[in-house]
Image (cartoon, grey):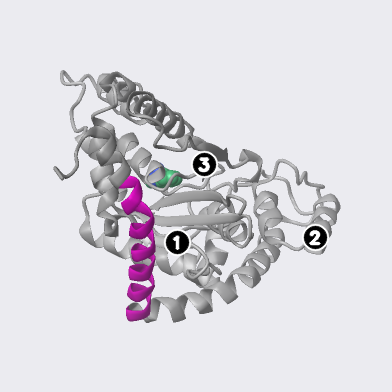
Amino acid sequence: MKHKKRILTGVTTSGSPHIGNLVGAVLPAIEASKSEETDSFLFLADYHSLIKNHDPQLTHNSSLEVAATWLSCGLDPKKVTFYRQSDVPEIMELAWVLGCMTAKGLLNRSHAYKAAVANNDQEGSADLDRGITMGLFNYPILMAADILMFNADLVPVGNDQKQHLEMTRDIANRFNHHYGKIFTIPEDQISDDAGIIPGLDGRKMSKSYRNVIPIFTDKNNLGKLIKRIKTNSLEPGQPKEPSTCNLFKILKAFGTPIEIEDMRRSYEEGLGWGKIKEVLTEIVDNKLSPFREEYQRVISDRHHLETTLNEGAEKARGAAAPVLKRVRDAVGIKSFN
Ligand code: TRP
């Protein structure tokens, strides 16, 4: 039998999912999971969320919201392995073993850590490590464990995660070189920046920029948020350029080909920004409203959600156990008889 390509990706549970997550990660991953050639592992990186966020309610709610989002947008938990990172203790165990094969110097070079140090430096702090936790420092090791635990072939992530994948490969190669070939060396699949939708201020939509449009908000609020998106000051009647316009980028992610063409014409004809925003609100709302109804149904049945995640954890642990056994044997931690 041909080896199915194993695709794995995680979502840090530290906020409510936004439409950038939807079109950039959730829908493409669900689409990829439908192929017979792939075997998908999708998980809630809840232990990763503790790195930046110490609010238990936020971690918990976000876990629930992210789980309900994936399930209401068409993920079939029978076809994929869908689980919470924290339900698979094998990952934590592997993280320790990997940490013992990871040079501290490698982690010193991590962009996230270096940015935090640079920030302290800029603020004139005598202690450059001020406020930096071991969680932040070790973040790439936990992520490597997430990936190597399941021998993933392909890891779809945003551009900001590219270095973490490089570090994962470094760690895996070092382990394999010393102990024998245990781990698959994963490839990254970086989403194309051109497809990334802009946030309210024109930068990439990201919860850390507070410029997001949540997926599951009502139409009224959606309209209000879309009204806040920055445009230029061209007046109604003046032709507008779609290719550089933030509204048009969102439209392209949500509209049908006909809607996109119609809008292109309206730009040329000089439709006013106010009207363009109204049309965009309709189009985005049409696309989101079926997901919204399904989301309400999914999130109101906590019992079913919990059962689904427990079943996912069982599948994930079934896949993780033999890998962890091989790792423990390889490093010499095994029974005496
Ligand atoms: N660090 C990723 C992010 O913030 C989330 C993540 C955690 C992840 N573990 C992973 C992604 C493993 C891919 C594979 O986006």
Q: In this picture, which residue range is highlighted in magenta?
A: 303-324
> In 3D space, how far apart are the residues under numbered discs 3 and 1 (Cα atoms)?
21 Å
- Image height check: is 37 above or below 278? above
Q: Which mark is residue 65?
A: none
Picture residue at 71% right of the left edge, 41% below the top: 244
Q: Nearer the viewer, residue 45 or 258?
A: 45
Point 57% across, 40% down: residue = 189
Whole-percent x, y for residue 169 in the image: 44, 30
10 Å neighbourhood of mark 2: few (<14), some, or many (≥20)? few
Q: Nearer the viewer, residue 128 or 69?
A: 69
Mark 1 and mark 2: Cα distance apart in space: 33 Å
Q: Which mark is residue 257?
A: 2
- Disc 3 C-beta below 8 A from ligand 1: yes
Q: On the rendering, which quadrant does ligand 1 occupy?
A: top left
Count of numbered circles on the image: 3
- Nearer-the-camera pick, 320 or 80: 320
Specify the amino acid type for callout 2.
Pro
Ranked by sequence position, the earlier of labels 3 and 1 is 1
Residue 319 lies in magenta, yes or no? yes
**What x and y, as percent, mark residue 94?**
28, 42
177 to the left or right of 273: left
Quarter of the C terminus within the rendering = top left
Q: In percent of the image, x 45 and y 56: which residue is there?
A: 42
Against 289, residue 148 (above or below) is above
Do the numbered discs 3 and 2 sit on residues whose CB atoms are within 8 Å?
A: no
Q: CA distance from mark 3 to mark 2?
A: 26 Å
The residue to which callout 3 is attached is: 158
**From what the image shows, is residue 216 above or below residue 237?**
below
